Amino acid sequence: IPLLFMADVIYGFKTAFPIPLALSCSFNPDNYKNATSVAAAESAASGIHLTFAPMADLVRDPRWGRVMESPGEDPYLNCIMTKAAVQGFQGDNPKEKGKIASCVKHFAGYGASEGGRDYNWVDISENTLYQYYLPSYKAALDAGAKMVMTSFNVIDGIPSSANTKLFRNILRKEWNFNGSTISDYAAIHETIINGLAENGEDAALKCIEAGVDIEMMSTHYINFGKKLVNEGKLSIELINQAVRNILNLKNDLGLFENPYKDASEEDEKRLHLCTEHRQLARQAARQSLVLLENNGVLPLNSKAKIGVAGPFADTDSASGGWFITAKNGSSSLMTALTERGFDVKSAMTAVLGSMEDKVFDVEDKTTEAAETLSDCDILIAAVGENPSDTGEACSKTCLRLSPNQEKLIQKLKQTGKPVIVIVFSGRPMELKPILPYCDALIQGWFLGTETGTGITDVLSGDYNPSGRLAMSFPQNVGQIPIYYNNYRTGRPYTGSNDHYVSKYLDCPNEPLYPFGYGLSYSKVEYNNFKAFVKNEKIEAEITICNRSDKETLETVQLYIRDIYASVVRPVKELKGFQQISLKPGETRTVHFTITKDMLKFYNPQLDYVFEPGEF
Ligand code: BGC
């Protein structure tokens, strides 16, 4: 029986793509699909058969370090992105050369860890679970994902790995999933620490019964499986089912004929970091960053002398926390700007300490940096969080930039020169404190191998930025969890002076930047919105005009509100989007057809229904 070689190939193997949250901000599923198909080709050549990806967990809390691996806060966008990711890894058939099997994770609700603290418990209503959290896992299975991983969290009082309702009822019965399942790392053992299983034997029994086929890392199945069967406590049929699922997977991958599948040193040389892969990574990088502010300083004047400062000005490690196979090797901003012909100078480029190492800052060279760069025309601050402070076990309660980075931005602004701030982070940070000092602000995430080149495409104006946020940016940590598609309160705040309404006394309800937000270098006008019912469908259209002299890629987003229903519905929900390219001055009419299916939701009995009414 051949072995299965499995690994975390999340957003690249040797060629690093932007982190998944950033890919989602491109609102272009092709970028995620390219990322995973490149990752599949490169890792298959190195002998990998299956990846523990994509992570489909919906997220609302940027304190949680793993938001970087998620497609974001919206069920609709998450489904589209997750599906694209699976298609890229597996193609039409994971047996094909250069494809690997995909394991969607973490089932279920891991993104709702209370307080944003990793591995923490989750307490969400069934309606919320079905409405918001489950759809993206299901989308992965509809796209053919071969495996499902449990999550670390307790949900409804039961750890996911021992959760019969999740793994037998929802996954197998409701969704007819016939692939295999795996626990997360030692999660079966952790059911003992949770206090659900009495000991290793009990943990094995409960998790096999719940429907988990493979135990990752801990060894209770191996230690106690046989004993449990011999003593009549565990039915051999459950063992047979689990084994059959795993053998089927190996068979689907063709491992019985060819146990090492695509492993080939020659292919490794040919594919790893090849030009074609890097080009796809560069397109993804420039489409994934999000322009948040711009008073006209961008795009850069090609004649201007540019000063670049901060820990991300000249680093080759901008691939984010999950990149284990090639941590370094991203193109640096300084190098890319220089190669593009800009006159550049740098200062204070020392590496940022990580919170894990208890050195959460850079040395204060802010005064010297401002002095050194004072003869430049435009200043760029490349700031953010240490890549190893994002990802698993990297929860934070303070989302501000480190003190010396905030100080650097202020000092640069005091020179009187325009300041462009680029934030490298795996999560939405608290950016309000730096806003007064930014002439332009770019959310640069961690963009992978083509970080510098991708950003330079945008800074130079060679690419007109098109990214839109897949996660809301809070005004401050006190607003968290914050997301755009919340349920409706009975006392909404409408801007009046009423005291007894749903609001904060010290902060607006709105996020600093909402889901779906992002600027380009063009002024785009939306006019003539129309919606009418025809043949039991709603036809909606709008005219979009590019009032600029630059070609632009505009993401037209369709949101719906269900005015009245048998359960309280969200204030609005994304139901569609179209990315359209507009030439300078061009006007186009964008059309959406809204079907009854798109208006369905889970009613109080958890039936997925369409209720006629006003939308
Ligand atoms: C993570 C998973 C990952 C696994 C194997 C766990 O700690 O939660 O996402 O796939 O480790 O590396």
Image (cartoon, rainbow, N blue to C red):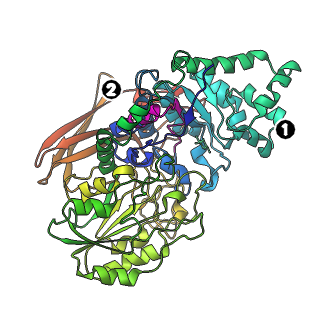
Amino acid type assigned to the residue bearing label 1 in the image: Asn
The residue carrying pointer 1 sits among few (fewer than 14), some (14 to 19) or many (20 or more) residues within 10 Å by Cα, namely some
Locate the C terminus by quadrant.
Answer: top left
User: Where in the image, quadrant-wise, is ligand 1 located?
Assistant: top right
Q: Which of marks 1 and 2 is in front?
A: 1
Locate the N terminus by quadrant.
Answer: top right
Image point (52%, 25%), residue name: 260
Front-most of residues 22 and 433: 22
Q: Is residue 317 above or below residue 581?
A: below
Q: Is residue 513 visible?
A: yes
Image point (60%, 34%), residue name: 149
Extreme-front residue of the structure: 266
Q: Is residue 308 above or below residue 190?
A: below
The residue beneath circle 1 is 199
Residue 357 x %, y %:
59, 66
Quarter where residue 563 is shown: top left
Residue 272 x %, y %:
38, 40
Q: In the displayed structure, does residue 100 sit left or right of residue 538?
A: right
Image point (43%, 52%), residue name: 319
Residue range (magenta): 37-58
Q: In this view, does 103 lie above or below 586?
A: above
**Does the stretch in magenta take in 57?**
yes
The residue beneath circle 2 is 537
The residue carrying pointer 2 sits among few (fewer than 14), some (14 to 19) or many (20 or more) residues within 10 Å by Cα, namely few
Residue 514 x %, y %:
40, 55
Q: In this view, does 241 lie above or below 376?
A: above
Quarter where residue 212 is shown: top right
